[in-house]
Image: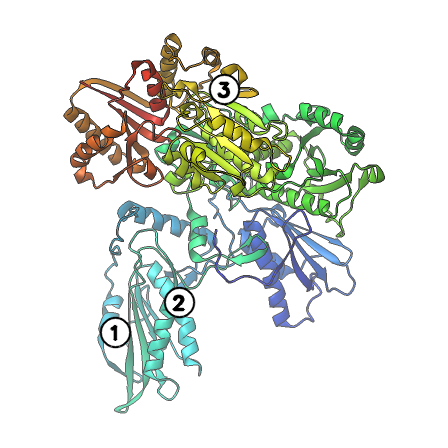
């Protein structure tokens, strides 16, 4: 998220495993009457700003030094409490704020904000906390600042209206600004007549009073320009966000008498410049595509006294606005990396009203975490319907034992204990005070959280125990000054991700403990240079319910990945790995440097390839140019290049060029590789076999059921593909398509092509397909070309009227020479739909893809038309159909020619 440049002077302290904002020295207690008024205001603003930033950023601690002489504070000053009540719009401060004092330092503990913060409260809360919204509205003759709740309702209503009547068309030209109807009103009509006049008499009584549509302001100051500049924004915001109106500056509001401003105090040209500048500095946010500015007219009307020019009156006519007008940027704060930043109006609106992506696409998925149930920074989380929910995954991976402390995964604990003498005794001693919970071990929790590894770390152990806050233990090989920094940064990242990614809404912190296993410092606790913060008892996990809720958030953190659907839905969402995928991803890469991953159609091989490359970057602390992704076709290569996590090439480029800097290689869709350009497998082994004496990683993903040729693949014989793992749980395709895939694979079993290893058929009984997602499978035969083209065009037209878009559709044909033939025919038939038809290279664009099945291998779309699915050799027809069908998530249409 891009923040605007305006930042805060508040300091983020980086040496704690939490977001800690230092507000410096200040008076905290009630006995602060002697300090100057301006100092009180500054202190209040600092603490309120810090509280706002922490509420919006996952929670944390406000830290400061008390200036109270006695050094102890019994009760927090009232003005600070008032600012917090305004932030959360509730008197229930204890839910979000707790205070303690350690010597001369005070700590204010702030829990993350969420839309459902108070049990039993069914009212809709805003997604963000704000000190001021900077949104105004008109109410009778008054101008009111919208509260966060009112602003949330207002913005939601505006968005619904704009999207319904004036939607944003991706790639289309901006539409004209929507007309907002203003109700006829006598005062407004009379005001329009006055607005048209060029002069008014000093002392003249205007024939109308203030109303919903009229505001009078007098020049009760000698600083005219500043007064006009300060007055315009909130009144323009109020009129524009309501039904429009007139602002007359230079009229007494009680008497309706024209006074104006004496010409000696200001000239008309200066007033015109001030008005123009004030409008230019307004902040507006559009939901529609008009991108128009606030519509207004301004006049400087002469005020005549005794027949001579006395001065001037400012008259401004404001039209109602289609979307939202702010007087200035909202006073709302967020922690971004190491700074407290003010959100721009666009960012604020996006976070306030960004909805869960409820569309036709998501009907195939189950919500695991809704935006309304998490912190302001949360993203929605989904999994395919029928797969394990986060509760099931938590019970499978991290079950809370009834009456003992469990080490998980136990196989890793045994492995670590045998590798490192004294580790078992050291960890057991640390766990002695805890009787119930789970100790989750990892060779590097940093890598698990997508952070760089520390080679001096033997392992990390996260303790989730009853009557204790979570504690992250880091065990070092040797004493290391950076060990505490590593542990602190990892714990901070974990805490933030539990809240902002995992959706945990309780009070939470992650304490740190760094230990050394070397003989000199065996079991020594390496204390950081800064004293730890003592958290209140409410930050401890008191029972199974709290522990399980935290562990379910942890499941989302560890198993969540950015969905390939994010680009299509227009917002970032997360999917969850299956337990099978997670167990493969969790393998110790140092011991699994070579691996063959056999994955049946729709089991997520490309997702796994992307995630393993991300893990490589962090575990081995290598740059993206040290990791090479190799596939057969250019569109898949380009799709991976967009991720910017590696170098990506096709097999032909791999064989043509040298790759001296490459250390790790991931090969995808390897069943479609050939040896026409040389032995690619031998070359990949040679590159990864040694790198400065250390072998690299070579993982190969393949599926013989989707082989598209009868040539030699270059893969080693099946019984030499070892070690290997298997992906057998279908995660992509809807029920009808998954059933069709199983039928195709059974046909392949009956008559496999000669380059299909018979042993691979042993995977068939292992296939796991969990029904629950309804889809469409239509197969039509004996069609003429014209009938095929007409059916495709008519079906697309129907789908588009139901809310699908061109980016949902792929049309796949058998060979490249058929692409141009069908593209011309289909384009002519669909020309009135105003859609773009591109190739597989445009898979990320808002256009229909029309390409060959081979070039679309490894990619996917919601709706796939298989047109003329013919192969040169009938022995690979079913393999060809398996590849075709597995590309479709929801709807599959197979059209056979006559």
* Mark drawn on residue 195: 1
Give the percent coordinates (x, y) of residue 97: 63, 50
CA–CA distance in space, label 2 to label 3: 67 Å
* Mark drawn on residue 716: 3
* Mark drawn on residue 281: 2
Residue 576, visible in the rendered structure = no
**Disc number lying in front (2 or 3):** 3
CA–CA distance in space, label 3 to label 1: 86 Å
Sequence-wise first label, 1 or 2: 1
Marks 1 and 2: CB-CB under 8 Å? no
Query: What residue is drawn where x is 59% and y is 40%?
Result: 618
Q: Quadrant of residue 761?
A: top left
Q: Determine the secondary structure under disc 3.
A: loop
Query: What residue is drawn where x is 72% and y is 49%?
Result: 533
Q: Determine the secondary structure under disc 1.
A: helix
Q: Quadrant of residue 649?
A: top left
- Circle count: 3
In the rendered structure, the answer to whether residue 702 lies left or right of residue 303 reads right
Q: Determine the secondary structure under disc 2.
A: loop
Residue nearest the observer in this picture, 802 or 677: 677
Note whether 809 is above or below 496 in the view shown.
above
Query: Label 2: how many residues lie within 10 Å, few (<14), some (14-19) or many (20+)?
Result: few
Query: Label 1: how many residues lie within 10 Å, few (<14), some (14-19) or many (20+)?
Result: many
**Disc number lying in front (3 or 1):** 3
């Amino acid at each position: 998220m891009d923040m605007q440049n305006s930042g805060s002077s508040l300091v983020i302290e980086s040496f704690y495993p939490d977001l800690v904002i230092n507000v410096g020295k200040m008076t905290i207690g009630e006995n602060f009457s002697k300090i100057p008024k301006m100092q009180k205001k500054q202190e209040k603003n600092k603490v309120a700003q810090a509280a706002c930033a922490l509420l919006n950023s996952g929670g944390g601690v406000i830290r400061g030094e008390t200036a109270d002489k006695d050094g102890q504070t019994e009760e927090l000053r009232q003005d600070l409490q008032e600012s917090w009540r305004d932030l959360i719009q509730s008197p229930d401060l204890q839910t979000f704020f707790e205070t303690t004092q350690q010597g001369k330092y005070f700590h204010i503990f702030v829990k993350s904000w969420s839309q459902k913060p108070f049990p039993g409260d069914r009212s809709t809360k805003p997604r963000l906390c704000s000190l001021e919204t900077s949104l105004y509205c008109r109410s009778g003759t008054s101008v009111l600042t919208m509260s966060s709740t009112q602003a949330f309702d207002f913005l939601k209503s505006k968005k619904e209206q704009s999207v319904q009547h004036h939607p944003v068309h991706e790639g289309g030209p901006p539409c004209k600004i929507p007309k907002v109807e203003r109700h006829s009103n006598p005062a407004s009509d009379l005001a329009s007549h006055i607005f048209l006049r060029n002069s008014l008499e000093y002392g003249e009584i205007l024939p109308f009073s203030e109303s919903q549509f009229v505001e009078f302001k007098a020049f009760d100051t000698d600083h005219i320009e500043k007064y006009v500049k300060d007055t315009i924004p909130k009144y323009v915001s109020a009129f524009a966000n309501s039904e429009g109106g007139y602002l007359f500056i230079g009229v007494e509001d009680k008497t309706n008498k024209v006074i104006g401003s004496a010409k000696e105090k200001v000239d008309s040209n200066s007033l015109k410049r001030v008005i123009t500048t004030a409008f230019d500095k307004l902040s507006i946010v559009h939901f529609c595509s008009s991108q128009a500015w606030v519509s207004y007219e301004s006049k400087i009307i002469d005020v005549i006294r005794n027949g001579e020019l006395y001065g001037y009156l400012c008259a401004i006519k404001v039209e109602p606005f289609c979307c939202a007008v702010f007087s200035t940027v909202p006073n709302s704060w967020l922690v971004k990396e190491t700074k407290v930043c003010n959100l721009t109006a666009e960012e604020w609106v996006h976070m306030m009203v960004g909805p869960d992506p409820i569309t036709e696409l998501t009907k195939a998925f189950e919500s695991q975490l809704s935006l309304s149930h998490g912190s302001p920074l949360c993203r929605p989380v989904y999994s395919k319907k029928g797969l394990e929910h986060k509760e099931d995954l938590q019970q499978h991976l991290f079950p809370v034992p009834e009456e003992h402390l469990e080490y998980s995964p136990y196989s890793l604990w045994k492995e670590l204990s045998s590798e490192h003498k004294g580790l078992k005794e050291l960890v057991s001693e640390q766990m002695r005070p805890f009787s119930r919970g789970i100790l989750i071990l990892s060779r590097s929790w940093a890598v698990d959280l997508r952070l760089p590894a520390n080679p001096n770390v033997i392992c990390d152990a996260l303790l989730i125990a009853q009557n204790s806050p979570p504690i992250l233990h880091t065990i070092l090989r040797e004493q290391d000054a950076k060990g505490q920094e590593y542990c602190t940064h990892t714990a901070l990242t974990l805490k933030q991700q539990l809240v902002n990614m995992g959706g945990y809404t309780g009070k939470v912190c992650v304490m740190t403990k760094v230990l050394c296993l070397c003989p000199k410092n065996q079991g020594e606790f390496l204390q950081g240079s800064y004293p730890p913060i003592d958290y209140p008892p409410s930050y401890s996990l008191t029972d199974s319910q709290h522990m399980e809720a935290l562990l379910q958030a942890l499941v989302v953190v560890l198993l969540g990945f950015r969905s390939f659907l994010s680009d299509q839905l227009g917002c970032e969402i997360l999917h969850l790995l299956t337990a099978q995928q997670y167990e493969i991803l969790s393998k110790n890469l140092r011991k699994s440097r070579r691996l063959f991953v056999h994955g049946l159609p729709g089991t997520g091989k490309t997702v796994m390839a992307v995630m393993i490359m991300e893990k490589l970057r962090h575990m081995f602390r290598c740059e993206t140019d040290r990791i090479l992704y190799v596939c057969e076709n250019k569109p898949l290569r380009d799709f991976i290049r967009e991720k910017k996590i590696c170098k990506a090439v096709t097999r032909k480029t791999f064989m043509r060029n040298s790759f001296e800097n490459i250390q790790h290689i991931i090969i995808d869709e390897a069943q479609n590789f050939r040896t026409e350009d040389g032995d690619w497998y031998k070359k990949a082994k040679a590159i990864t076999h040694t790198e400065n004496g250390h072998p690299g990683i070579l993982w190969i993903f393949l599926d013989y059921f989707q082989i598209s040729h009868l040539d030699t693949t270059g893969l080693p014989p099946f019984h030499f593909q070892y070690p290997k793992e298997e992906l057998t749980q279908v995660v992509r395709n809807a029920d009808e398509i998954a059933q069709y895939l199983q039928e195709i694979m059974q046909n392949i079993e009956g008559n496999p092509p000669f380059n299909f290893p018979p042993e691979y058929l042993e995977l068939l009984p292992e296939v796991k397909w969990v029904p629950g997602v309804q889809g469409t499978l239509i197969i039509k035969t004996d069609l003429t070309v014209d009938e095929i083209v007409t059916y495709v065009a008519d079906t697309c037209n129907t789908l588009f009227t139901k809310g699908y878009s061109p980016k949902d559709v792929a049309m796949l044909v058998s060979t490249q020479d058929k692409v141009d033939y069908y593209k011309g025919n289909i384009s002519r038939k669909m020309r009135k739909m105003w859609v773009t038809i591109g190739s597989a290279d445009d898979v990320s664009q808002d256009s229909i893809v029309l390409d060959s099945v081979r070039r679309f291998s490894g990619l996917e779309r919601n709706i796939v038309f298989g047109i003329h699915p013919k192969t040169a050799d009938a022995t690979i027809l079913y393999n060809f159909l398996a590849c075709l069908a597995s590309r479709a998530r929801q709807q599959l249409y197979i059209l056979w020619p006559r």
